[in-house]
Every structure is written in structure tokens, then in C-alpha cells.
Amino acid sequence: MLGVTIICVGKLKEKYWTEACQEYAKRLQSFCRFRIIEVDEERLGDAPSEAQIRQTLMKEGKRITGAVPAGAALMALCIEGKQRSSEELAAELEKLAVNGVSQVAFVIGGSWGLSDEVKSQAVCRLSMSRMTFPHQLARVMLCEQIYRAFQISSGGKYHK
């Protein structure tokens, strides 16, 4: 069974986001070994310099790479990533599994994004949309899309 991990910078603040993620985690139990890992977010002032932002990305990046399961295929969510349909995401997960990958780790960065180091380790870069979403909503959306991908692959009725 494929292991799927979402690594996120920061914690969910509202109960309704947590409950939504827990619901998808429960649904995913029959398809994969699913978990969410939260790493600490660096705090910056209101007008950080480029150097402070780079330093923040570097620190968060080290926490992210330290949380990636051994041998996992890394999928980075980032603005310059490629948009994929739900069917394409399902096919990508299937392809990884067929090629012997036993762990997949999706990464959602903090408010300044992801470090170049994290992005360079990714087997693919994903973009949810050209629109901007709060990180908490992005986490719920990613959980839902992972669930949808497994439903598509298994021929379930969830995806229409």
C-alpha cells in the first residue's frame, strides 16, 4: 500500500480546517497509509528584506527535507508548478506506484513559498491554480484531490 504524506509549514488554526483534513484522512485509510506532518513556520516582520526571506526559506526547507520519508517521491506545490487535472494527478500517483515508489510526499510551503533546495528535490512541481489560496485551504484542497485521485484509480463513484 502506498504511503502518502503531506508535509506542511505551519499549523491549522481553525477547527473546521482540521476537521476537514481529518475527514479526508479517514476516507484515505482504505487506499493508502496517509499522514500529515506539520513543521514549524518561521516568523518574519511586516517588511522583511530579501535576505531575511531567503533565510526563512532555508530554515523551513531544512525542516521540510528532514520530514520527508526515506525514498519518498517529493511533489512540491508551488506557484511555478504545472497545473494538472484530477485525472492527471491520479495517473501520476499510479505511475509512481507502478515504478516501485512506496512513498509519496506532497509539500506545502509557508507564506513565502518553498526553498529552491526543496523544489530541486521534487519529482514534479504542482500548481493548484493561478489564483492564490490561504495555506489552510490549500491543505484541505490537496487532501481532497488525493482522495479524488484514489477514487479515480479505483473506479469509485466519487469522481464524476
Image (cartoon, rainbow, N blue to C red):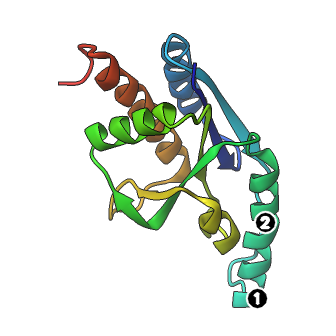
Provide residue 60's location: percent of width, then percent of height: 77, 62
**Above or below for 144 versus 154:** below
Per the model, the C-alpha gap separating discs 1 and 2 is: 14 Å
| Residue receiving disc 2 | 43
Residue at horizontal 36 percent and vertical 30 percent from the top? 149
Q: Where on the picture, by quarter, is residue 34?
A: top right
Q: Where on the picture, by quarter, is residue 62?
A: bottom right
Residue at horizontal 74 percent and vertical 39 percent from the top? 69
Left/right of residue 159 with respect to residue 147 in the rendered view: left
Q: What residue type is labelled 1?
A: Ala
**Above or below for 15 versus 109:** above
Looking at the rendered image, the disc whose residue lies closer to the viewer, 1 or 2, is 1
| Residue receiving disc 1 | 51
How many C-alpha atoms fall within 10 Å of the one at disc 2: few (<14), some, or many (≥20)? few
Asked whether residue 42 appears in the rendered view, the answer is no
Give residue 128's mark. Answer: none
Which one is in front, 19 or 144? 144
- Of the 4 image quadrants, the one containing the N terminus is top right
- Of the 4 image quadrants, the one containing the C terminus is top left
Residue at horizontal 42 percent and vertical 38 percent from the top? 95
Which one is in front, 81 or 26? 81
Which one is in front, 143 or 136? 143
Asked whether residue 67 appears in the rendered view, the answer is yes
Which one is in front, 85 or 73? 73
Q: Give the mark nearest the N terminus, 1 or 2.
A: 2
Whether the residues at callouts 1 and 2 have beta carbons within 8 Å, the answer is no
**Above or below for 156 versus 136:** above
